[in-house]
Image (cartoon, helix red, strand yellow):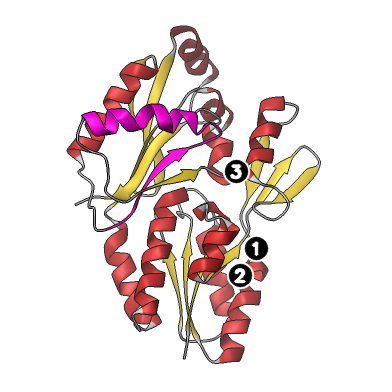
């Protein structure tokens, strides 16, 4: 009996990464004006940020439907296998609820659904951990228990380049966003209890980056897991950030790179830089 690991496209795994570790991906939908795209299928990250920069339409996201999850789950049932589904945080999307409904529709016992309470590379870390446990021969139930134990230690901190996309998403008033633009106020955000939260503000990118490094020092990285340097559209932001990680002695041993995809990029916009990792 095999164990299938399934996630949604908000985990920001590339198609090659998903294939290499044996993960099924259910895509989120991204809407630009009258055009609807499937994340990672007919909308790549570079194309998304190009459309975002053009500014003709503000994007919106839509969760996968229960039917989107039902198809791979029915394949699991037909094979007599097991499955662990790890979704985007329920505080950010209804994706988790869609997966639960699909599980009920499938009426098949050995399917387990995990609310990651995370996003982007935070979900990626959990998915990769689940795959490692699968390859060690653990059952879906055992994998779920271990992933549930890990998820409270996932940390995401990032500096956002502009407040405009937070304003569009209703997280800031127009007045606050306007003030931030004038004063070059940069927010530092975190994913806490599954939601995106502003945890600091600073005047200018340099000061905001110092705050970000402070959070990384206060929540040290567990080097037994991979860590991800996050960026939205500009990998050069990460290249500028890495020497500062080294100087502050918080550079992870297993550091990888992750471009933030459309699902989260819709809300934070271009120019973001940050870290996703497991805390000690």
Q: Which mark is residue 225?
A: none
Residue 229 figure quarter: top left
Q: Are marks 2 and 1 in contact (CB under 8 Å)?
A: yes
Residue 194 versus residue 38: which sits nearer the camera? 38
246 left or right, relative to 120: left
Q: Which residue is mark 1?
A: 65
User: Is 109 drawn above or below residue 260 in the view shown?
Assistant: below
The label nearer to you, 3 versus 1, is 3
Q: Are marks 3 and 1 in contact (CB under 8 Å)?
A: no
Q: CA distance from mark 3 to mark 1?
A: 18 Å
Residue at 77%, 37% in the rendered image: 33
Q: Classify 10 Å Cα crowding around label 1: few (below 14), some (14-19), many (20 and above).
A: some
Q: Measured from the top left, where is residue 184 in percent x and y?
A: 44, 12
Q: CA distance from mark 3 to mark 2?
A: 20 Å
Is residue 159 shown in magenta? Answer: no
Magenta residues span 225-247
User: Is 105 drawn above or below residue 98 in the view shown?
Assistant: below
Q: Measured from the top left, where is residue 132 in percent x and y?
A: 37, 71
Q: Look at the numbered disc 1 and give the secondary structure of its residue.
A: loop
Q: Which residue is mark 2?
A: 69
Residue at 62%, 83% in the rendered image: 75
Residue at 50%, 62% in the rendered image: 96
Residue 79 versus residue 206: which sits nearer the camera? 206
Q: Measured from the top left, where is residue 69 in percent x and y?
A: 61, 70
Q: Which residue is mark 3?
A: 262
* Residue 203 seen by the camera: yes
Q: Look at the numbered disc 3 and give the secondary structure of its residue.
A: helix
User: Is 185 drawn above or below residue 200 in the view shown?
Assistant: above
Q: Classify 10 Å Cα crowding around label 2: few (below 14), some (14-19), many (20 and above).
A: many
Is residue 238 shown in magenta? Answer: yes
Q: Classify 10 Å Cα crowding around label 3: few (below 14), some (14-19), many (20 and above).
A: many
Could you tell which of marks 3 and 1 lies nearer the N-terminus?
1
């Amino acid at each position: 009996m095999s164990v299938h690991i399934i996630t949604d496209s908000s985990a920001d795994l590339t198609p090659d990464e998903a294939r290499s570790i044996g993960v099924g991906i259910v895509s989120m939908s991204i809407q630009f004006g009258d055009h609807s795209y499937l994340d990672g299928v007919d909308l790549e990250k570079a194309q998304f940020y190009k459309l975002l920069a053009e500014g003709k339409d503000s994007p919106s996201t839509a969760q996968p439907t229960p039917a989107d999850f039902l198809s791979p789950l029915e394949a699991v049932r037909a094979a007599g296998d097991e499955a662990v589904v790890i979704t985007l945080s329920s505080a950010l999307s209804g994706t988790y609820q869609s997966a639960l409904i699909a599980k009920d529709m499938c009426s098949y016992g050995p399917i387990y659904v995990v609310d990651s309470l995370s996003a982007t590379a935070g979900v990626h870390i959990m998915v990769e951990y689940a795959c490692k446990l699968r390859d060690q021969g653990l059952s879906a139930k055992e994998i779920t228990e271990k992933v549930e134990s890990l998820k409270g230690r996932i940390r995401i901190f990032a500096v956002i380049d502009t407040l405009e996309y937070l304003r569009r998403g209703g997280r800031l008033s127009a007045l606050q966003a306007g003030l931030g633009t004038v004063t070059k106020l940069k927010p530092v955000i975190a994913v806490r209890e599954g939601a995106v939260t502003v945890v600091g503000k600073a005047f200018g990118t340099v000061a905001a980056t110092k705050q970000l490094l402070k959070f990384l020092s206060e929540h040290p990285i567990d080097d037994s897991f991979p860590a991800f340097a996050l960026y939205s559209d500009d990998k050069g932001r990460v290249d500028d950030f890495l020497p500062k990680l080294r100087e502050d002695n918080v550079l992870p041993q297993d550091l990888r790179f992750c471009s933030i995809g459309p699902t989260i990029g819709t809300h934070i916009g271009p120019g973001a830089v940050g870290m996703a990792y497991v805390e000690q």
